[in-house]
Image (spheres, grey):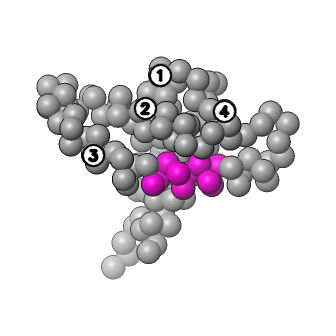
Amino acid sequence: MTSILFRFIANAVALGVAVWLVGDITLGEDGASNGSKTVTLLVVALIFGVVNVVVKPVVKFFSLPLLIVTLGLFTLVINGLMLLLTDWIAGDSFEVDGFGAAVFGGLIVSIVSWAVNLVLDRDDD
């Protein structure tokens, strides 16, 4: 259960960093309060987590030949597509303008999520 919570927090932080760094990724309305944007970020992180658990393995399976040929670099495209799918599901509360922004945002989300999981998910045995 804590692993799911850590992944949720990592996704939320990673999406927040992507919104902050990539100008073509926006969260909420322009005049929205910080509390409203935080709630929106948590909802988008939940949607992104579900997309990564349900859709991403299927896409990776069917794109396995491309993943092998590109030595795994096609994963960047898949991450961008998952971000665009999250944009489509979330509606107006989360906007990704363009495929390039989605791929760059997916790269940022992957790196930040990995780093946050590394820090949060420590086994102190």
Q: What is the CA distance from the residue labelled 1 to the residue labelled 4?
A: 14 Å
Is 49 covered by the magenta stretch? yes
Name the residue rendered at 43%, 32% in the picture: 80
Give the percent coordinates (x, y) of residue 87. Answer: 56, 37
Q: Do the residues labelled 1 and 2 touch (CB within 8 Å)?
A: yes
Give the percent coordinates (x, y) of residue 81. Answer: 41, 33
Name the residue rendered at 14%, 31% in the picture: 65
Mark nearest the camera among 3 and 4 is: 3
Residue 26's tag is 4
Q: Mark 1 points at which residue?
A: 99
Tag 2 secondary structure: helix
> What is the magenta segment's predominant secondary structure?
helix
Question: Can residue 107 be seen here?
Answer: no
Q: In this view, does 39 lie to the left or right of 62?
A: right
The segment highlighted magenta reads 41-50
Q: Which amino acid does label 2 sit on?
A: Gly
